[in-house]
Amino acid sequence: MIKLRLSELRDTKSGHILHDVLPGDYLSSGGLSFAKRGERSHTNDGPDGRDYHIHKDCEAFIILQGNGTMEINGEHTPVTTGDIVIVEPGEDHHLNSSEDDPIVTVWCHAGLNRHKNQQQEESE
């Protein structure tokens, strides 16, 4: 896991904003997530309902609001508004939202190709 602050990102005018910390030329998937009070993400997501959630690539979480912990391989690291967490391949990860100030995040993956909605359609 890599943890940094939004203010630590290098100013960039091309590519994606996380290019220095999230491998891949283009943001390829992602979303906006509003956690419930005390919610733990990806609980029982693993094979056969096991409590395990990993990826083969890196995933970025940008904490837009709230606080909680990022649980990586069973260890909890506090996170708050303005933090960026990069989960590395193979790390079992869960975002735990605070009861008092629930987390709102943007999460994303990057890769060699653009998201299918951003790809240029082939002319017939």
Image (tube, rainbow, N blue to C red):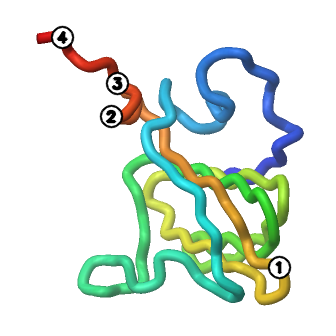
Label 1 vs label 4, nearer the camera:
4
Label 3: element kind: loop
As measured in the structure, the alpha-carbon distance from the residue carrying label 1 to the one carrying label 3 is 38 Å
Q: Residues within 10 Å of mark 4 (few under 14, many from 20)?
A: few
Using the image, determine if residue 17 lies above or below residue 39.
above
Q: Position of residue 32 (x, y in %)?
A: 59, 57
Q: Quadrant of the N terminus?
A: bottom right
Residue occupying image coordinates x 72% and y 16%: 13
Looking at the image, tell me whether mark 1 or mark 4 is earlier in sequence order: 1
Name which residue lies at 75% across and 77% down: 102
What is the number of the mark on residue 29?
none
- As drawn, the residue found furthest toward the right would be 7
| Distance from Cα at disc 4 to Cα at disc 2 | 16 Å
Q: Amino acid at mark 4?
A: Ser
Report the disc number at residue 116. Answer: 2
Which kind of residue does numbered mark 1 sit on?
Asp
Say left or right for 78 vs 28.
right
Say which residue label 4 marks: 123
Could you tell me which secondary element the residue under label 4 belongs to? Answer: loop
Label 1 residue SS: loop
Q: Is 87 drawn above or below residue 124 in the view shown? A: below
Assess disc 2: are there few (<14), some (14-19) or many (≥20) residues with their C-alpha within 10 Å of its C-alpha.
few
Task: Give the residue at mark 1.
Answer: 101
Labelled pair 3, 2 in contact (Cβ < 8 Å): yes
Mark 3 vs mark 2, CA separation in Å: 5 Å
Q: Amino acid at mark 3?
A: Gln
The quarter of the rendered structure image containing the C terminus is top left
Q: Which circle, 4 or 2, is nearer the viewer? A: 4
Q: Secondary structure at mark 2?
A: helix
Select label 3 or label 4 by which is in front.
4
Cα distance, mark 3 to mark 4?
12 Å
Q: Quick check: can you spot residue 1?
A: no
